[in-house]
Amino acid sequence: MDAFKSLEAIACPLPLSGIDTDQLIPARFMKRSRADGYGDYLLHDLRFDDLGQPRPDCPLNAPRWQGARILVTRRNFGSGSSREAAVYALVDYGFACVIAPSFGDIFASNAINNGLLPATVSEEDCEALLAGLEDGDCIARVDLEACEIRAANLVIPFRIDPVWRTKLLNGWDDIDLTLSHAAAIEAFQAKDSIDRPWLVPRLRKS
């Protein structure tokens, strides 16, 4: 997983609340191979009509937001089922960051494990950012080291769990995070083998 320090990119506003994982990747597309990518199916029923034609009122179809790598939306993003394919669809589409006032817990954890930053902002800041992106410049800069977003003449702080922040900054998965404490683990094992020698497994002689 690549390290995430900062990102400057087009930010697409999606002013909807409660977008759940079933909307992010409809179940009928989940039989397809991950190797083929899920990006084409991201928010499929929001982006396309019953005939498969792009809906002109969907921001993701607007020319000015093509190539967006940052998504700005409203509260409770990624609620619903635990399907990790919802994160795959966002990442495969090209998104590296989602900004919202709140996220589904499992979705946010899956996002971190796939290098997608879930940046939590206040309701007020979210509405100001949505309005600014719709009316003005659509370029935003997300700085994970400073936990700060700059866009539409706004400077907005965001929140993220400190452990998740460490993982993204270093490009670590859960195993990498554990290995970062290898020295402390080895020191504990050495001391514990002296303090409680009866717990140390012993090989039987053949």
Image: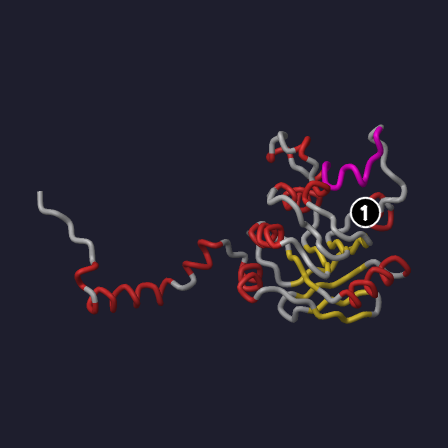
Q: Residue at x 68, y 61 (%)?
A: 119
Residue 46 lies in the magenta stretch? yes
Q: How is the image coloured?
A: secondary structure
Residue with the most extreme top position: 51
How many numbered tags mark residues here?
Answer: 1
Which percent across, then down, holds residue 132?
86, 63
Residue 155 placed where, x, y %?
77, 71
Q: Nearer the viewer, residue 172 or 81?
A: 81
Whole-percent x, y for residue 170 in the image = 53, 61
Amino acid type shown at disc 1 = Gln
- The part of the chain drawn in magenta is 40-50
> Which residue is found at the position 64% from the left and 46% from the top?
87
| Left or right: residue 29 compared with residue 182 | right
Vertical relation: 206 (above or below) 8: above
The part of the image, by quadrant, that contains residue 57 is top right
> Left or right: where does residue 137 sit relative to residue 78?
right
Is label 1 in a helix, a strand or a loop? loop
Please say if 60 is above or below 99.
above
Q: Which residue is mark 1?
A: 66
Q: Position of residue 23 (x, y in %)?
A: 73, 41
Identified at 62% across, 41% down, the residue is 85
Say whether residue 40 is left or right of residue 193: right
Question: Residue sitting at 25 percent across and 66 percent down?
Answer: 192
Q: Which of 73 and 173 lies nearest the eye of the viewer?
A: 73
